[in-house]
Amino acid sequence: MTNEQYHNLIIGSGEAGKYLAWNLAKMGQTTAVVERSMIGGSCPNVACLPSKNIIHSAKAVALADPTTGLGVMTGSFKVDMSGVARRKSMMVNGLVDLHLANFKASGAELIMGEARFTEPKTVQLMLNGGGSRQLRGDRVFLCVGTRASIPDVPGLTDSGPMTHVDALNLERLPEHLVILGGGYVGLEFAQAMRRFGSRVTIVQRGRQLLDREDPEVSQALLELMKDDGVQVLLQAEVLSVAGRSGDNVTLKIRSGTSESLVEASDILVAAGRTPNTDRLDIARGGVELDSRGYIRVNEKLQTSATDVWAMGDCAGSPQFTHAGYDDFRIVLNNLAGGNRSTRGRLIPYCLFTDPELARVGMSESEAKAKNVPYRVAKVPMSSVPRMQTLSQTRGFAKALIGTDNQILGFTVFGAEASELMAVAQTAMLGGMPFTAFRDAIFTHPTAAEGLIVLFTSGFAGAK
Ligand SMILES: Cc1cc2nc3c(=O)[nH]c(=O)nc-3n(C[C@H](O)[C@H](O)[C@H](O)COP(=O)(O)OP(=O)(O)OC[C@H]3O[C@@H](n4cnc5c(N)ncnc54)[C@H](O)[C@@H]3O)c2cc1C
């Protein structure tokens, strides 16, 4: 089979892959993007955007509850999961159409099929419509992403557990959903499904939820889950599973020295990610992987093979869409003669529970581990007037301040946390001292006004 030659060959149409394709093709370079299933990658199809769409429907359920005290009385209402799934699917279909329009307008060729290396910079495609093609790129960009890991627990795979992909398509309400994993995917689904009306149990291996957060943050999320009626089992390990998810399952769980059986209707696995590098025959492309199967890259996202780059989840970048987007910018900039790298990036993070948790920069545990000197400013969200108007006084804002008055880290658990965090992040990017917030005039009553509260009164009892 003869090779079809392109300037740029991109495997995977996720965040970094698609933006790179659209930009390079618009410059007049021949660009092929190979995608085996999801046009535009995980984010618009099975991850960020559909999950936040579903979470919004779940919030509507919570707001319609007459016990919220909002003074709005509804008649009796019920959740229609097929309506929830329909709204989500309409959004996803619209996003896919937008992606197709962008591919068309840019001139990048989108080819639906699965790629495997046959030799350096050359892949064979098994086309989804049947047949095959062999493509070669002057430059190759690997953006193949990750998928949900299924832990090696006896009986788990045979039980047919859901991953986020299946859970986002549910048109029925699980009676009792057991979620394996207390990270951000697990927590977002736990609260949403509980609000829709499922009984929910989270099984978390570690000592706390969200194992990378400060213990007080994890504790706050634990209390939120419990108050919402989600059962959380910490330091708990699933030993075996029997039955079929979607019908009836029994999980044998060890917690400390005791073992117990949990009966449920459904299992959702949210226990980490596996890189999609296992079906690429990547060694034939001369590209090295690390011990966990992620593509080894340097700080410019170059792989071990000449003229081959990797970006996004599969390159070991922080597993967020915005990190993948920045990977694309780094590579594009460097192709144009720039000198950008992944070093020292300030990558924020948000958990879209209600209320949200957002963090940028260092956590207190990290500062301690690195022996970085800091002071802490912390206030409860109840001290922010905006939160009183929303009746959402749960949570706190916390900042770590360095010796030069710079903000080293900012964590907020509360309503509108993601937007508030972006304000603090802007200051960190601009190198502004915390006193600039303390002395600023923000509109009353906004969430941003909370930064004045934090930096004026938040040092009481500070270390
Ligand atoms: C439930 C959930 C919620 C999330 N929410 C958020 C959020 O709110 N905010 C956030 O920033 N991040 C969120 N994330 C993480 C985010 O979705 C990922 O970090 C991001 O989508 C990764 O982008 P990527 O381009 O690296 O990979 P992907 O978007 O997964 O793209 C990789 C593409 O490559 C294709 N592919 C793989 N192998 C081949 C092959 N051999 N041939 C052809 N095509 C191939 C795949 O089909 C896929 O489309 C969430 C993740 C999950 C699971």
Image (cartoon, grey):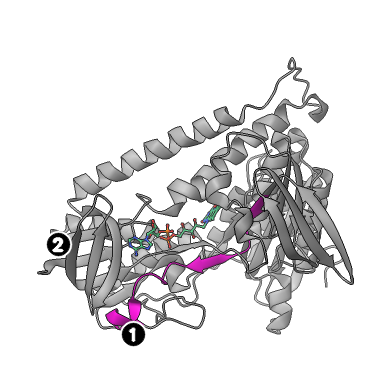
- Please state, as top left, top right, bottom left or bottom right, where the C terminus lies in the image: bottom right
Residue positioned 66% across, 35% down in the render:
173
From the viewer's perspective, tell me whether residue 358 is left or right of residue 304. Answer: right
Against 309, residue 52 (above or below) is: above
Residue 432 image point, x, y percent: 57, 65
Query: Crowdedness of circle 2 by 10 Å Cα count: few (<14), some, many (20+)?
Result: some
Ligand 1 has an atom within 8 Å of the beta carbon of the residue at disc 1: no
Please name whichever residue, 410 or 98, is drawn nearer the observer in this view of the structure.
98
Residue 317 image point, x, y percent: 47, 70
From the viewer's perspective, tell me whether residue 156 is left or right of residue 200. Answer: left
- Looking at the image, how many numbered discs can be counted on the residues? 2
Against 71, residue 350 (above or below) is: below
Question: What segment is highlighted magenta in the picture?
Answer: 267-287
Query: Crowdedness of circle 1 by 10 Å Cα count: few (<14), some, many (20+)?
Result: some
Against 166, residue 302 (above or below) is: below
Residue 80 is inside the magenta segment: no
> The disc labelled 2 sits on which kind of residue?
Gln
| Residue lying furthest top | 75
| Residue beneath disc 2 | 29
- Please state, as top left, top right, bottom left or bottom right, where the N terminus lies in the image: bottom left
Please name whichever residue, 402 or 45, is drawn nearer the observer in this view of the structure.
45
From the viewer's perspective, tell me whether residue 215 is left or right of residue 101. Answer: right
Can residue 386 be seen in this snapshot?
A: no
C-beta proximity under 8 Å, tags 1 and 2: no
Q: How much space separates mark 1 and mark 2, taking CA atoms? A: 24 Å
| Residue beneath disc 1 | 304
Quadrant location, ligand no. 1:
bottom left
> The disc labelled 1 sits on which kind of residue?
Ser
Q: Quadrant of residue 98?
A: top left
Residue 368 image point, x, y percent: 74, 80
Q: Quadrant of residue 334?
A: bottom left
